[in-house]
Amino acid sequence: QVQLVESGGGLVQPGGSLRLSCAASGNIFSMNTMGWYRQAPGKQRDLVASLASDRTNYADSVKGRFTIGRDNAKNTVYLQMNSLKPEDTAIYYCNANAWVTALRRDEYWGQGTQVTVSS
């Protein structure tokens, strides 16, 4: 099993910044893609950003404001969020695709961390 532990959410004013972290631990043979999704009340869970090797992918709504980074040695992924807007308010979930053996790859989710952008 692989566990994902998120941290860094909270309340911030519009225009402010937050940094989310997600650390993966457990039976990890090799880590593949890591990323962040978010889900606002009454809406579906959508991709915010993902990182695989040296390839990044961002939702159009966060391009230029959010930056995803990764520490492969620590199996940790970060999300630096700048110029936050009220519409960024959501629960943010860490996601990881991890090889748990040489032949088996599974998908894992964190428990979610609340980000609220409000004055």
Image (cartoon, rainbow, N blue to C red):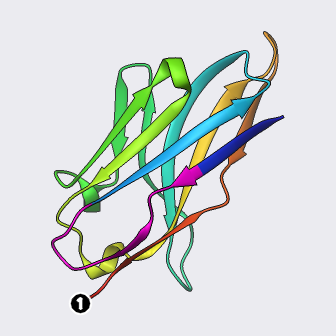
Please give the name of the residue rendered at 67% of the width and 59% of the height, measured from the top-left corner: 111
In the rendered view, would you say 112 is above or below 35? below
Neighbours of disc 1 within 10 Å: few (<14), some (14-19), many (20+)? few
Is 19 positioned to the left or the right of 84 in the image?
right
Q: Position of residue 1 (x, y in %)?
A: 84, 34
Q: Which residue is mark 1?
A: 119
Q: Which residues are magenta?
A: 6-17
Give percent across and percent down for residue 97.
Answer: 65, 33
Q: Nearer the viewer, residue 87 or 57?
A: 87
- In the rendered image, residue 12 lying in the magenta stretch gets the answer yes
* Quadrant housing residue 71: top left
Work out whether 5 lies above or below 70. below
Residue furthest out toward the bottom: 119
Q: Residue at x 81, y 13 (%)?
A: 103
- Asked if the magenta segment contains residue 36, the reply would be no
Direction top: furthest residue: 102
Q: Quadrant of the C terminus?
A: bottom left
Residue drawn at x 56%, y 86% is 42
SS assignment at label 1: loop
Q: Nearer the viewer, residue 104 or 86?
A: 86
Amino acid type at image mark 1: Ser
Q: Is 76 in front, or is 31? A: 76
> On the rendered structure, is 83 left or right of 12?
left
Q: Where on the picture, by quarter, is residue 98? A: top right
Q: Is residue 30 above or below residue 96?
A: above
Residue 40, horizontal then vertical, whole percent: 49, 78
